[in-house]
Amino acid sequence: MQVIEEEPIRLTRTDDRIRDLLHLLHSLSDLQAAGSLLGWDQMTGGLPEGAGEVRAHQAATIKGLIHEQRTAARLGQLLDELEGVIEHSSFTNTDRGLVRWVRHDYEWATKLPRSLVEEMERASVISYQAWVRARATNDFASFAPHLQRTIAFQREVADHLGYQEHRYDALFDRGNPGMTSRDLERLFAPIRETSMSLLRRIQDSALGIETSFLTGNFAQEQQRALAEQLLGSIGYDFSRGGLALSPHPFTFMGLGAPQDVRLTIRSSDFLPSSMMAALHEGGHALYEQGGDKALVRTPLAHGTSSGFHESQSRLWENVIGRSEPFWHHHYQLVQQALPHPFQQISVQAFSRALNHVQASLIRVEADEVTYNLHIIIRFELEQALLDGTLAVESLPRLWKEKYRSYLGIEPESDANGVLQDVQWVSGFGSFPGLTLGNLYSAQIAHALRQQFADCDERLSRGETTFILTWLREHIHRFGSIYRANELLQHVSGEDANPQYLVTYLTEKFSRLYALL
């Protein structure tokens, strides 16, 4: 494991091989940003409904050019040359991180034919439009052929990449290098058990929490304005970032971080949908905006893994954004934006409502206790779809069965069930990173509170800069120079440990629901 040393973040541009490598990577980064703009346009409503076919060809062409550059023979030659000397003291940890990251990407890309990459991109654009229509009309059957095609692509990708135990390992390794299904199952087991046990105890308790005031006819403009204020309050830099509306909230990370980072929210009659999405996506965006300037136009400018990225979003959304101390100061923003009904609701009642636990159907609106059960369900279904033990036509039925088993509820429609997530329009393997993010965030939050014993008092006064400064110093500025496990060791002093999340959930919700 590489030790994170206190040295300047610097690429050795005086070395001809590093300089040549950066020349190739800068061109690749620019092309990827251009491709990302096409996706931003489509997912924020800029693409006319009838333009899907031509956009699919445009996106595929750019994806093919990107693939060509990612697999260039010269890139491979430079990697071979640098790997023979990179441990020499004349090179920096930043150089080593760059070579390691590019080698991982190069090995991944060179195993996939360009024709397959282009075909998947075309299918993804068409699949997204099919998903939007299918969800709006509750018509899984119309989306099923697109999902079946995605599964076929994912199996082919996994077979090209190679794996030891499960196809899923090959796909998940893309965003979380070195982690396998077996690792996930080990880390998730105590989280699953704790979540299901807490849910049962809360359901059996006599304590109820009033939440009706969170639902109402809240104007889209007011929700967006509130989101902007919350984002600004946690340090999101609008001079280097944007905010838009989309059917599913997301952060675009390929546009040119740290200088161009954009996010979306969706408006809803359930206020936390937009409000907490702003904090969640803001956490992603802060991570991207916090990368050192030396990493611009390189792959190191982005977060080190999907799980680590999610740790930042879940930290701001849940650990901070659902805490009462945070709202002691920030609740005035809600009351100003939406005086009715919130002028009549106390901050204590508001923060308690944000932490109300109830088995629900929609993942992005789930509370902290049940959220990970939503993820584990998807993880198990993806594995079954990939290995062929689950047929696409049986997916809605098994989805309902798992929700009934894990959460005690069953969706009344596919729109609130198997069609609710956008991720399956393009591939598998992203969902487990969300629970990894919860795990990492609890571990990071523990380290943060060890550093700042007065954390809650400062939050109550409206202070958040000290948190962002600490995160930037210990996590954000490094981008993906270091592996996720190295960064977690650096921040918390140990490897991934689910006990921090188990303790956080148990203590927080036992207090809230008087279960102690």
Image (cartoon, rainbow, N blue to C red):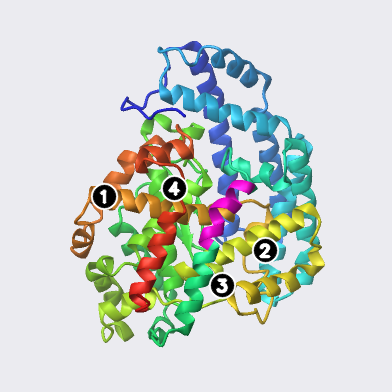
Earlier residue among tags 3 and 1: 3
The image quadrant of residue 412 is bottom right
Looking at the picture, which amino acid does disc 4 mark? Val
Q: Is residue 139 above or below residue 260?
A: below
Q: Secondary structure at mark 4?
A: strand
Q: Is residue 59 magenta?
A: no
Q: CA distance from mark 1 to mark 2?
A: 52 Å
Residue that mark 3 sits on: 362
Residue 35 position in % (x across, y down): 60, 43
Residue that mark 4 sits on: 261
Q: Nearer the viewer, residue 65 or 293?
A: 293
- Are the two marked residues, 1 and 2, in contact with CB atoms closer than 8 angstroms? no
The image quadrant of residue 401 is bottom right
Q: Residue 269: tell me if it is visible.
A: no
Q: Is residue 187 magenta?
A: yes
Q: Secondary structure at mark 3?
A: loop
Q: Secondary structure at mark 1?
A: helix
The span shown in magenta is: 182-191
Earlier residue among tags 3 and 4: 4
Earlier residue among tags 1 and 4: 4
- Are the two marked residues, 3 and 1, in contact with CB atoms closer than 8 angstroms? no
Q: CA distance from mark 3 to mark 1?
A: 34 Å
